[in-house]
Amino acid sequence: MKIEIWSDFVCPFCYIGKRNLEAALEQFPYREHIEVNYMSFELDPAADTEAGASTHEMLARKYGMSLDQVKGMTANVTAQAAAVGLAYRLDDTTVQNTFQAHRLSQYAAAEGAGAKVAERLFKAYFIDADNIGDSKRLTELAAECGLDREAVKAMLQSDAYKEEVRAQEQEAAGLNIRGVPYFVIDRKYAISGARPPADFLGAITQAWEEGQHSPFTSLDGEGEAGTCKDGWCAPSND
């Protein structure tokens, strides 16, 4: 069984959703037969390639809110992250372009280190408040994950994996994916947002039991699942 996850490395709900999926897989008896692939989705393709304004400043401008209002909103997100064991530092994060990070992610997947690199990129941004738009820093992060430093450096300086990233983004558009995280299970079921582990486990179990004979079904539904779109996350205090 294959699970594809469209996400962006600066999307706070994507990291939370990743943890919830992992918790579900821990309960699934056939988890060793599941392949998880990280697919590319840029929330803000036009973001500056240099780390720019703080996340709070960007959100204040985007939604016409005061910095205090924004900090109240992101405190709610930080609390949701803490509930799954993630210590977010949203006060310290900045607006960043993630295209290079996605290229690295696709290269890592081809080298058999996709999951390890995806985790490191999320951690770098949300836990370490690092700059994942910087190619030099990306090379260092990749080396931490066991990839060859010089090979990664050469890849980032080339055009390699640019087409792969763009193709996955076009595929997302074809699947009508407008926000992330978005999970596609065996091309049969789709779940949007950082849903609880029980939701993932139910969908995975159903897909496993039904085999390959069901049509593609979206399980978006209603609920308290967080989704990021159009640059970041819509303000919410739910």
Image (cartoon, rainbow, N blue to C red):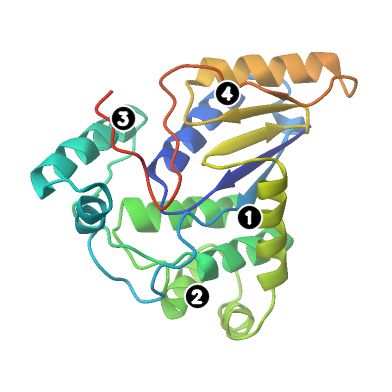
Marks 4 and 1 sit apart, C-alpha to C-alpha, by: 26 Å
Within 10 angstroms of label 3, few (less than 14), some, or many (20 or more) residues? Answer: some
- Mark 4: amino acid: Asp
Residue indicated by mark 4: 220
Name which residue lies at 18% across and 43% down: 70
Residue 50: x and y in percent read 35, 76
Q: Which mark is residue 2?
A: none
- First reached walking from the N terminus: tag 4 or tag 1: 1
- Mark 1 to mark 3: distance in Å? 25 Å
Circle 1 sits on which residue?
A: 114
> Marks 4/3: CA distance?
19 Å
* Mark closest to the chain's N terminus, 4 or 3: 3
Q: CA distance from mark 3 to mark 2?
A: 30 Å
**Residue 235 rendering spot, x and y as whole percentages:** 29, 37
Q: Answer left or right for 145 relative to 183.
A: left
Q: Is residue 231 above or below residue 107?
A: above
Q: Quadrant of the N terminus?
A: top right
4 and 3 marks in contact (CB < 8 Å): no
- Cα separation, mark 2 vs mark 4, equals 36 Å
Query: Which part of the image, by quadrant, shows the C terminus?
Result: top left
